[in-house]
Amino acid sequence: MSKRGMRRTMVGVVVSNKMDKTVVVRVERLVQDPEYKKYVRRYSRFMAHDEANACNVGDQVQIIEHRPISKRKRWKVQATLSAAATV
């Protein structure tokens, strides 16, 4: 179904930026319960490469599928959609 050269993109929220050039992004998806037909939130966490160390916790970012960068990093930050509200 996927064509060569087509990479998946996802939108999520940065939950950790403590590593160098790496952020942890939490992506939310809605799944319908098979019996009750209600929608339930499910979350996945992805390690994403952030070359400029520009992302902060709470930022909404778009990540794109990438070749393996390290043992657990297979995603790269493509764009910051909205910055976190600072207090």
Image: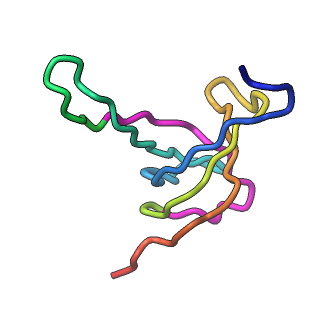
Given residues 83 and 24, the one toward you in this image is 83
**Image quadrant of residue 29?**
top left
Give x and y (percent) for residue 2. 74, 24
Q: Residue 33 location, x and y as percent?
A: 23, 24
- In the rendered structure, the answer to whether residue 66 lies left or right of residue 81 reads right
Determine if the magenta segment contains residue 49: yes
Q: Nearer the viewer, residue 43 or 53?
A: 43
Quarter the N terminus occupies: top right
- Furthest residue toward bottom: 87
52 up-or-down from 7: above or below: below
Quarter of the view holding residue 54:
bottom right
Q: Is residue 70 left or right of residue 10?
A: right
Residue 79 image point, x, y percent: 67, 61
Left-right relation of 76 to 23 = right
Q: In the image, is residue 58 above or below residue 48?
A: below
Q: Residue at x 43, y 33 (%)?
A: 44
Q: Residue at x 16, y 17 (%)?
A: 35
Q: Quadrant of the C terminus?
A: bottom left
Magenta residues (range): 42-56
The residue that appears at 68% across and 31% down in the rendered structure is 74
